[in-house]
Image: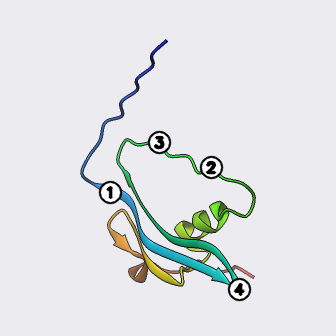
Amino acid sequence: MNLNIKSPKSEENLIEVQNVTKRFKNTIAVDDLSLQIHKGEFVALLGPNGAGKTTLIEMLEGIQRPDSGSISILGSTWKKMKPFSDPK
């Protein structure tokens, strides 16, 4: 069976990650990652333990900050977004 599912695409980037790197001491968790997620797209992050999936999600959520690169969500760049604050 040939299954071809096409999602509606828009030129609008809902999420844009450009050249993002995150290090923890001597460990590079995310290395020069770039991606764009458009309206109507479904995305899955796959990879082995330690591949940086959780670190990327935490950067998108504002829990972690990237060491370099830029993140834009719904047109707001990371520098304009408020960082996550621990309620403790």
Q: Secondary structure at mark 3?
A: loop
Q: Residue at x 63, y 81 (%)?
A: 23
Q: Secondary structure at mark 4?
A: loop
Cβ atoms at labels 4 and 1 below 8 Å apart: no
> Which one is earlier in the sequence, the residue at label 3 or at label 1?
1
Dot 2 amino acid type: Leu
Amino acid type of the residue that numbered disc 3 sits on in the rendered structure: Phe
Q: Determine whether 4 is above or below 10 in the image.
A: above
- Relative vertical location of residue 7 with respect to residue 68 in this rendering, above or below: above
Whether residues under marks 3 and 1 lie with C-beta atoms below 8 angstroms apart, the answer is no
Residue tagged 3 = 42
Q: Residues within 10 Å of mark 2 (few under 14, many from 20)?
A: few
- The alpha-carbon separation of the residues under discs 2 and 1 comes to 21 Å
CA neighbours of label 3 inside 10 A, class few (<14), some (14 to 19), many (20+): few
How much space separates mark 2 and mark 3, taking CA atoms? 13 Å
User: Which residue is identified by label 4?
Assistant: 26
Q: Quadrant of residue 58?
A: bottom right
